[in-house]
Image (spheres, grey):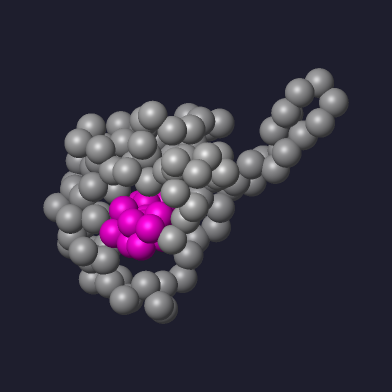
Amino acid sequence: MKLDERSIRWSLNHLIKYGDTDLFPKPIEFDSLYKIENDTVKKLKDLDLGNYQYGASRRFIVPKDELSYRIATQLDPLDNIILTAIIYEYGSQIENRRVSMPEDKVFGYRLAPQGDWNLYNPNVS
């Protein structure tokens, strides 16, 4: 399986604008990869995702409140571009199988890529 060039470009723009997490600063690698966007897209679109070896992630213990902690993981920047591109390209198939929003039974972000590179429906969180 290979990713569409459009999905990779969308992913990179999304990660440049929004970063990859609300817990950690945006990795500087995103800016570097964005500066050479055409080369980045060319390399990533030729990847065989079935045989791709994902990189190491960064893991931290992050305080939740005064008494508890949680483990937070930040993906390798290239892996994050790939994962975001996969979500952009195939996420609507997952979203179509979820409980519909009017049923008001599922509480979470809903996939709805926006023109401003936002990945989620801004009215649902």
Q: Nearer the viewer, residue 108 or 66?
A: 108
Residue 74, image x, y percentages: 54, 45
Quadrant of the drawing holding the N terminus: bottom left
Q: Nearer the viewer, residue 90 or 101?
A: 101
Look at 14% across and 52% down and name the residue there: 38
Look at 44% across and 41% down and name the residue there: 102
From the viewer's perspective, is 36 left or right of 80? left
Residue range corresponding to the magenta coloring:
77-96
Residue 85, image x, y percentages: 32, 55
Quadrant in the rendering for residue 114: top left
Q: Does the magenta stretch include residue 66?
A: no
| 52 w.r.t. 121: above or below | below
Q: Nearer the viewer, residue 116 or 61?
A: 116
| 48 w.r.t. 74: above or below | below
Residue 38 appears in the figure = yes
Q: Is residue 89 magenta?
A: yes
Look at 36% across and 62% down and name the residue there: 93
Residue 110, image x, y percentages: 42, 43
Residue 26, image x, y percentages: 42, 33
